[in-house]
Image (cartoon, grey):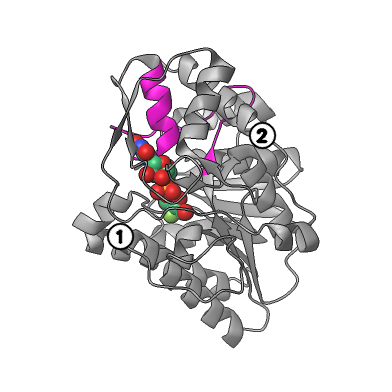
Amino acid sequence: MNILVTGGLGFIGSHTVVELIESNHNVIIADNLSNSEIGVLDRIAQITNVKPKFYQINVTDKKAVEEIFKNNHIDGIIHFAGFKAVGESVENPLKYYHNNILSTIVLSELCLKYQVNKFVFSSSATVYGDQPSPLKEDMILLPTTNPYGETKAISERILKDISKANGNFSVCLLRYFNPVGAHKSSIIGENPKGIPNNLMPYITKVAKGDLPKLNIFGNDYDTSDGTGVRDFIHVVDLAKGHVKAIENMNSNVNIYNLGTGKGTSVLELVNAFIKCNNINIPYEIVERRPGDVAITFADASKAEKELGWKAELTIEDMVKNSWEYEKRLI
Ligand code: UFG
């Protein structure tokens, strides 16, 4: 297939592009480089020997996106492009509503106009709100604690409605849990701009000495060691989930959790990092972070049953690959 990947130079996008190419798909990337760098394009080529066609555009710019649809035959799109910093979305909600919702609308309008019938959307487990895990796809969606999460829930609703009204338009909503790790080549990985918000990139910066210590947000949750529990998933497994999703779109709306189905505590992840990489991570227990839930993990059985997809890589692979990649960054 010819697949348009928006945000294809970002963390999850770039790993997905590699897996798509390795499954013999032809990829076109649209990315405005707001949270990625152009060098990733060459790195994708280094891994796959294929340099995808690249458009540096903003996906909210309908005219610019339409040029891609006019000049390429597209069979399906995978829409990653979007802002994702939870804290920033609370401070600047309009930035998030404008960018994340408008991009979904623009892409859908063009899909209908150019008869592109497969739309895979990058959603998040955050749409479940604070419900008991394991989280299942048929649970009702609860309000999330921040505008970023709302943009995911609203985009899901928009895509479902469009699909209901347009028989041929198939939508796949992929709800990600906590992606970490990096490609085994260490050529691509996660490299957020500024001080990381998420746990794994924070740990790797501490390991490298760029940050003095890790703050662990609370050890008084009702969990085995008191720290938060998350479903960490290796980004390469997540990327493979997208390939399966776009290759198996057969009904109007498909929804899948992409997680491992297993919860790991913050402290367990930190200890696995220390043990596997033989490097110390100084940490301190601090106050809970507002908005955090105690436990989140997936019921990942639907994707296994319907897509034949299952996360294969372990916590050890995740901590090892994250550190190997970080070490190569200057
Ligand atoms: N944590 C720390 N210290 C840090 C960073 C995080 O202790 O410096 C803890 C958090 O309190 C939480 C866990 O590590 O218990 C994971 O936190 P992350 O910020 O890495 O991830 P979240 O689970 O908060 O959120 C992630 C994505 C969201 C997505 C959500 C879906 O960042 O975009 O998963 O569940 F919506």
Q: Earlier in the sequence, mark 2 or mark 1?
A: 1
Determine which residue is flagged by label 1.
96
Q: Residue at x 27, y 50 (%)?
A: 87
Span colored in magenta: 179-207
Image spot of residue 275 (x, y percent): 56, 18
Q: Secondary structure at mark 1?
A: helix
Q: Is residue 67 visible?
A: yes
Is residue 184 a member of the stretch shown in magenta? yes
Q: Amino acid at mark 2?
A: Thr
Q: Amino acid at mark 1?
A: Tyr
Q: Quadrant of residue 319?
A: top right
Q: Is residue 31 visible?
A: no
- Mark 1 surroundings within 10 Å by alpha-carbon count, few (fewer than 14), some (14 through 19), many (20 or more): many
The nearer-to-camera label among 2 and 1 is 2
Which quadrant holds the C terminus?
top left
Q: Quadrant of residue 104?
A: bottom left
Q: Residue at x 76, y 43 (%)?
A: 23
Ligand 1 location (quadrant)? top left
Determine which residue is flagged by label 2.
314
From the viewer's side, name the closer residue of 242 and 297. Answer: 297
Above or below: residue 219 compared with residue 281: below
Q: Residue at x 63, y 76 (%)?
A: 169
Q: Residue at x 40, y 54 (%)?
A: 82
Q: Quadrant of residue 276?
A: top right
Image spot of residue 244 (x, y percent): 73, 54
Image spot of residue 238 (x, y percent): 62, 46
Mark seen at residue 35: none
Which quadrant holds the N terminus?
bottom right
